[in-house]
Image: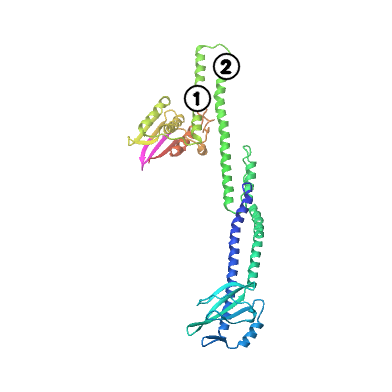
Amino acid sequence: MYNFSFKNRIAFNYIISTALLIGVVFMIIYVVVKISVSNHLDQDLQREVDRHSKEIEVKDGVIALRKHTEWMEREHNTVGVDPVFIEFLDAEGKLIDKSPNLKDSELLYTPNYVDNIVTEGKLADKKIRQEQVPIYDDDEIAGYLLVAVSIEGSTVVLESLRHVLLISYPFILLILFFVARIIAGRSIKPINDIIETSNAITRDNLISRIPLPHNKDELYILSDTINNLLDRVEQTIEREKSFTSYASHEFRTPLAVLKGTLEVLIRKPRGQEEYEEKINYCIKEVDRLNHLVDELLILTRYENQKQSLKLEDTSVENLVSICLKRFSSQIQNKGIQVHTNITPENIRIKTDSYLFSTIINNILSNAIKYSEQGGIIRVDVTNENNTIIFVIKDNGMGIAQKDMDKIFDKFYRSYENDHPQIKGFGLGLAIVKRFSELLQIKIEIASQEAKGTVITLAIPQS
């Protein structure tokens, strides 16, 4: 059973259920035919009883036939394949008369039985069905009429039917098995297509898709679902390839800068100021490299699984204040004005402080990075219908409309070539997006070129 193919298992299971069904049907057919034959015999018996009852007369408690001679001749002439046997008994069960075809045999008498009784037995090795009917004289039993018919023919018919059903049963099942196997083979063809397509798919070949069946049944849904899965796998692997390519590029650039700077530095003796300048430059590149590693580690840690969140009651005012202090030097250097409005002032949220502060830090970092000298940044926090709304708005260079659908992609940076002086790796908003999903925060971004960007965070509070 366990070595059967899927096609054979379907056919086998079909045959098991069909065998039970056909078996029940055959049994019903046999029982119905048997009952029908028995009813037919009982009707024959009843007709004979009615006919002979009319020929009986009772005088002074004695049973006699009105036309005995004619009856004897008729009964003698009607002996056939299924003869009728007649016997008359007195009240004590003693034989009065019987049909000539009984010869020396007698029918089975059941004493003291006042109602009609139908029984089966044997008469000279022949199977018979007989009925015993009481004969009354003034409400007293004067004797009995016994009528019997041979059931040899009926028995032959039933035995023939039984043999036909028993012999045809396994042949029918065998034929049905091969028919079911053929039908199952056609039905599971999409499964074979799934197997062939799956074998053809490799990391370098993600184009193949399963042909969809014509009938929109469960196999159609399965094939379509697997095709959708393959689409997602292909997209994931393509993103992984892009991620690896971008990461390699971002690592290679600062390393190349470090190597080039150090090679230039050791070509000839230089003054202390020049050494300090180059070393400080290398330190900044190392810091950039460390920052890139940190962001990559954060993404890797939270990309594929949901980490256990450490939810705690957090003051929104303190969290915003800490984030702004972290960027105080950049804010002062660019002369940026930061306006905060937290209403009410004592707003508190239940969230993972590390993840949420990382979201705010990355958004503020971008706002500062892409703001012009003397720009303005607004941070507004309100509580609306048990939802904390964070709005961070700047009046910087904004984001081009064509780039809006890519801003959450890893390593994607708008205006990267137009503004090489703005450093970054394009991971900030990717981290914001992932952390917002973990904290079930709804994020919306609206931006216009040369007018600025507005980022809205909606934080539900249970």
**Is residue 355 magenta-colored?**
no
Residue 283 versus residue 193 in the image, above or below: above
Q: Mark 1 points at which residue?
A: 290
Q: What element carries label 1?
A: helix
Observer-nearest residue: 184 or 91?
Answer: 91
| Residue located beneath label 2 in the image | 264
Q: Which amino acid does label 1 sit on?
A: Asn
Residue at 57%, 70% in the rendered image:
35
Colour convention of the picture: rainbow
Residue 385 sits inside the magenta stretch: yes
Q: Which of marks 2 and 1 is nearer the N terminus?
A: 2
Q: How far apart are marks 2 and 1 (CA)?
A: 23 Å
Helix, strand or loop at disc 2?
helix
Q: Where is residue 126 in the image (x, y as percent from the top left)?
A: 64, 72
Name the residue nearer the viewer: 100 or 415.
100
Q: Which of marks 2 and 1 is in front?
A: 1
Query: How would you classify the magenta stretch by its main secondary structure?
Result: strand
Q: What stretch is highlighted in magenta?
A: 380-395
Q: What is the three-letter code of the residue carrying label 2?
A: Val
Residue 145, picture quadrant: bottom right
Residue sitting at x 62%, y 51%: 9
Count how many numbered circles sit on residues in the image: 2
Residue found 61% across the figure and 52% down from its top: 10
